[in-house]
Image: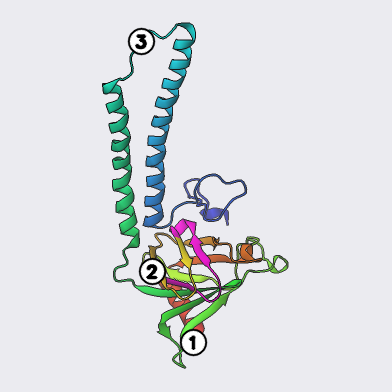
Amino acid sequence: MLQNFSIFNTIFNDAPQPWQLGFQDSAAPGFTGIVELHNDIIFYLIVICIAVFWVLFSIVISFNRAPFVYKYMNHGTILETIWTILPALVLVAIAFPSFKLLYLMDEVISPTITIKIVGNQWYWSIEYSDYTIDNEDSIDFDAYLIPESDLELGQFRLLDVDNRITVPVNCHIRIIVTASDVLHSFAVPSLGIKIDATPGRLNQASFIAERIGTFYGQCSEICGVYHGFMPIVVDSVSVPNYLSFLDSFCD
């Protein structure tokens, strides 16, 4: 087993970790854009904080040792102009990339596969409506949390399910999300997906899994007493393995 080991292999963080503060590793272009936008906004935030605290401490230190020199001066036109224009420019610098990302993530053009997902109390129903089996029914199944007593080695407590959503790598996937009872929220961080499941309404989102892997998510809308027991698992596999997954429903 150690023959294929290499220090250059990359280990991705595709599941939540205890006391985790940062993001999971990106597996889709949409989530990569979200992380980059977050980092850009953090840069502006740091610059603003440094400037504000520098001004604050300079005033405290300077006027603690000396009296006000210009006690009759009521206005500083240049200064007021600067602190009005600069925030507006910062907002414009943040708005352009955020709107661009918003429209790119909202656009669903010619998806390869469409998957319908229904939130229930407290499990998910998955339907591959593009395919039918011998009796002309679409491929569908339910995904339940695996109880702690049934977990196998390598499975995550409160995160693994008995039936996983399987998608081919590097394919444009559209998901249509709704709910049968109360509000739910379908969220898989590594794929940049977080979409409300609303009874009587169809919401859609899309993603492209850029690498093979297993991605974990959870319901992100308080939906009842077992809200914390609605995990989501998405397997991104090669196209031959995806076809084998589809063939398993024809047996």
- Residue that protrudes farthest toward the top in the picture: 66
Q: Label 2 sits on what residue type? A: Ile
Residue 170 position, x and y percent, is 37, 64
Q: Label 1 sits on what residue type? A: Cys
Instruction: Find disc 3 in the rendering and name its residue.
Output: 70
Residue in front for this viewpoint, 62 or 42? 62
In the image, taking residue 44 as reference, residue 218 lies left or right, namely right
Res 103 quadrant in image: bottom left
The crowd level at tag 1 (other Cα within 10 Å; few <14, some 14-19, many 20+) is few
In the image, taking residue 85 as reference, residue 210 lies left or right, namely right
Is 81 in the magenta?
A: no
Residue 126 position, x and y percent, is 50, 76
Q: Residue at left 73%, top 67%?
A: 149
The tag on residue 173 is 2
User: Which of labels 2 and 1 is toward the front?
Assistant: 2
The crowd level at tag 2 (other Cα within 10 Å; few <14, some 14-19, many 20+) is many
Q: Are marks 1 and 3 in contact (CB under 8 Å)?
A: no
Q: Image height check: is 88 above or below 114?
A: above
Q: Residue at left 27%, top 22%?
A: 77
Of the two numbered discs 1 and 3 on the same chain, state the one appearing first in sequence.
Answer: 3
- Residue that protrudes farthest toward the right in the picture: 149
Provide the secondary structure element on which disc 3 rests. Answer: loop
Q: Residue at left 39%, top 63%?
A: 207
Region of the chain picked out in magenta, as a range: 176-193
Q: Image height check: is 59 above or below 222?
A: above
Distance CA(mark 2)–CA(mark 1): 22 Å
Q: How many numbered callouts?
A: 3
Q: Label 3 sits on what residue type? A: Tyr
Residue 111 position, x and y percent, is 33, 71
Distance CA(mark 3)–CA(mark 2): 65 Å
Instruction: Find disc 1 in the rendering and name its residue.
Output: 250
